[in-house]
Image (cartoon, rainbow, N blue to C red):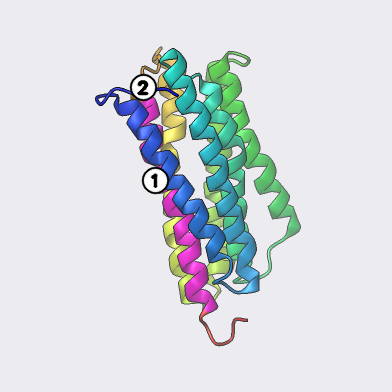
Amino acid sequence: MAVFETTDLTAASYSVALYGLVATAVLLLLGTAWVSRGWKIAVSFCAIAALVGVGALYEARTAWATVGNVPIVYHYVGWTISMPLQILALYFMASQAGRLSIGLFWRLVIVSVLMVFVRYLGEAGFMHATLAFLIGLVFWLYILGELFFGQMDETIRGSLREPVQRGYFWLRLIVTVGWAIYPLGNFITSFAGYVDDGALSVAYNLADFLNRMAFGLAILATAVLDSERPDNA
């Protein structure tokens, strides 16, 4: 078992984020019993995303303890699974306000996976860094376009369910502001020649409090409040 120094901020950030995600996952799994049937999928997806984050952070912390740096693959493995799951949680959340097309479902799955995978190809050197960055940015902007101007936004705005509208506003803000750290980190490592000495890992770990934990808890809070509606079984 590795013993970290008291001043090792990177290791501390991994531990705090790791335990935070464990607590979030447990709470979300328990929360599936507190919400109506239609909300269980969205809450479960967020719980799985948190569990994936737990595994990814544990492996990354082990790598930091072993070699003193964290290869980018440790970040991207978790993101490739957890980020599409979160986008689909938003899809099933919006479906509580109205019917969404199956085509939108598959577009979100494919685009969210490719968004992360293409960034990885660029940072790992398998693809031209500039091209990979631009393609990944386009995919992220497409997701934002769907959230702000697409079918999900129209469905939410046409709904009278206030908890869903309020929750969607905050979750969309997280995807817009919180997720901006990922293309920013991609840009820094790809074009600024930055080699992560632990600082970028600390930033990613702190971002997990918003992008994974707060995201899942916002879904749960929205689901609980909406499930309390007398007409929602």
Amino acid under disc 1: Phe
Q: Nearer the viewer, residue 30 or 93?
A: 30
Taking the image as shown, residue 111 lies to the left or right of residue 145, namely right
Dot 2 corresponds to which residue? Answer: 198
Q: Quadrant of residue 154?
A: bottom right
Q: Residue at x 36, y 17 (%)?
A: 197
Q: Quadrant of residue 227?
A: bottom right
Amino acid under disc 2: Gly
Magenta region, main secondary structure: helix
Q: Which residues are magenta?
A: 200-227
Give the mark, 1 or 2, whose residue is nearer the N terminus.
2
Per the model, the C-alpha gap separating discs 1 and 2 is 18 Å
Dot 1 corresponds to which residue? Answer: 209
Magenta stretch holds residue 203: yes
Res. 65 visible in picture: yes
Q: Is residue 201 above or below residue 155?
A: above
